[in-house]
Image (cartoon, grey):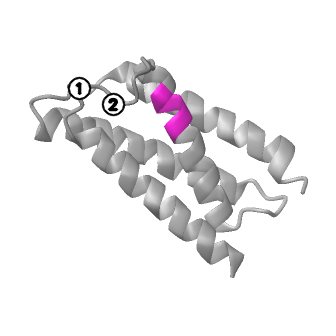
Amino acid sequence: MVRNYFFYIALLLTITITVGSLISLKDGLGIGVQVSDKILHAFSYCLLTISWLLAYGSTSISLKPTIFVALAVFIYGIIIEFLQGALTDYRQADLLDIFANFSGIAVAIIFFMLVLKKN
C-alpha cells in the first residue's frame, strides 16, 4: 500500500518537471531567490530518481532495478532537453543541463545505496 503512494509521488514529480521544463520562466521561479539553473536540475533529478527508486520497490541487494531506474530517469532528462529545443522558442537544449541531471541522479543513487537501502 505504501508503495502506491511512492508511485503517485514519483508520477507527480515527473509531471511537474516535465511542465516546468517546457513552460516559459522568464520571470524566474517567483520565490524571490536566485537559484542556479544547474543546481535546480541536479536537485530535481535527485528527488525524481529517489522517488522512482522507492516507487519501483528497489530494496533488494540486486543493482539491476537501481540501474534501470537511473537509466530511465537519465533518458527522460535527455528527452526533456531535446523537447525544449524542438518545441519551444523560449527554452533551449543545454548539454550542461544533462550533466547537472546526471549529477543529481548519481547523488540519488549514492544516497539510496548508503542510507535508504540499509533501512
Q: Report the amino acid beneath label 1.
A: Asp
Q: Residues within 10 Å of mark 2 (few under 14, many from 20)?
A: few
Q: Residue 54 location, x and y as percent? A: 67, 61
Check the image and report above or below for 4 versus 74.
below
Q: Is residue 105 visible?
A: yes
The answer to if 82 sits in the magenta stretch is: no
- Of all residues, the one furthest to the right in this rendering is 118
Query: Can you tell which quarter of the image residue 95 is in?
Result: top left
Q: Secondary structure at mark 2?
A: loop
Instruction: Report the front residue among 102 and 9.
Output: 9
User: What number is the disc on residue 27?
Assistant: 1
User: Marks 1 and 2: CB-CB under 8 Å?
Assistant: yes
Check the image and report above or below for 94 versus 48.
above
- Horizontal side of 45 relative to 21 (left or right) equals right
Which quarter of the image is occupied by the C terminus?
A: bottom right
Query: Can you tell which quarter of the image residue 33 is in?
Result: top left
Q: According to the image, label 2 marks what residue?
A: 30
Instruction: Report the front residue among 43 and 73.
Output: 43
Provide the residue span drawn in magenta: 40-44
Q: Report the amino acid beneath label 2.
A: Gly
Tell me which secondary structure the magenta stretch mostly adopts.
helix
Query: Can you tell which quarter of the image residue 86 is in?
Result: top left
